[in-house]
Image (spheres, grey):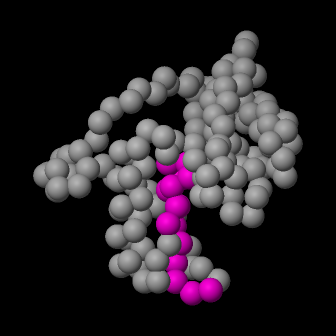
């Protein structure tokens, strides 16, 4: 049987390529080049599927994503209209904090305090969701790629 999954490839702050397969929870890989990360993630997908089969677990099918408008800013304060997004927060080596939103590739920010970071990440998410051109853009203007693989 042939499976088809969307693979999101991003480049981290150290230049390492990270590949994530959102339909297969926990399935990701990395590489020093785009070609290497593609080879590695294909292996990761194969291993993930083999493991699920061995455990008798179903193979998740990818759900087609659709675009929708989410109320942002003042409108989001109404009960039930806010969007919850997980943010990864890290302490910066030079002091302060930095954060990224795993579900929004390329959505990063920083702040000297947690309060400043929270305000900055809120603004970054609002701008990201409001700007179609931001999808797939990394800091520094590098473009990420979204690939669909058949395994």
Q: Nearer the viewer, residue 71 or 133?
A: 133
Judge whether 94 appears above or below 30 on screen. Answer: below
Residue occupying the point 23% across, 55% down? 73
Judge whether 148 appears above or below 72 on screen. Answer: above
Q: Quadrant of the C terminus?
A: top right
Exactly how many numbered labels are in the figure? 0
Does the stretch in magenta take in 105? yes
Q: Nearer the viewer, residue 146 or 41?
A: 146
Which percent across, then down, holds residue 26? 64, 46
Q: On the picture, is 36 further left or further right than 123?
A: right
Which percent across, then down, holds residue 122? 36, 62
- What secondary structure is the stretch in magenta mostly built from? loop
Q: Which residues are magenta?
A: 94-109
Judge whether 74 appears above or below 113 on screen. Answer: above
Asked where in the image residue 39 lies, by quadrant, the reply is top right
Q: Residue furthest front?
A: 141
Q: Nearer the viewer, residue 30 or 145?
A: 145
Q: Quadrant of the N terminus?
A: top right
Residue occupying the point 85% across, 39% down? 35
* Whether residue 20 can be seen here: no
Residue occupying the point 65% across, 43% down? 144
* Whether residue 9 can be seen here: yes
Q: Residue furthest top?
A: 1
Which percent across, then down, holds residue 93? 64, 83
Does the stretch in magenta take in 98? yes
Residue occupying the point 41% across, 26% down? 66
Q: On the picture, is 17 further left or further right than 123?
A: right
Which percent across, then down, holds residue 6? 62, 30
Q: Residue furthest left?
A: 78
């Amino acid at each position: 049987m042939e499976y088809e999954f969307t693979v999101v490839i991003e480049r981290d702050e150290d230049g390492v390529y990270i590949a994530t397969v959102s339909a297969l929870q926990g399935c990701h890989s990395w590489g020093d080049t785009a070609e290497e990360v593609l080879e590695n993630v294909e292996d990761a997908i194969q291993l993930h599927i083999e493991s699920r089969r061995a455990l008798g677990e179903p193979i998740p099918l990818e759900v087609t994503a659709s675009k929708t408008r989410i109320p942002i800013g003042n409108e989001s304060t109404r009960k039930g209209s806010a969007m919850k997004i997980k943010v990864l927060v890290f302490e910066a080596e030079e002091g302060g904090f930095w954060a990224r939103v795993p579900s929004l590739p390329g959505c990063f920010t920083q702040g000297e305090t947690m309060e400043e970071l929270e305000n900055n990440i809120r603004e970054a998410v609002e701008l990201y969701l409001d700007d179609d051109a931001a999808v797939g853009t990394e800091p520094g203007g590098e473009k990420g790629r979204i690939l669909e693989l058949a395994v």
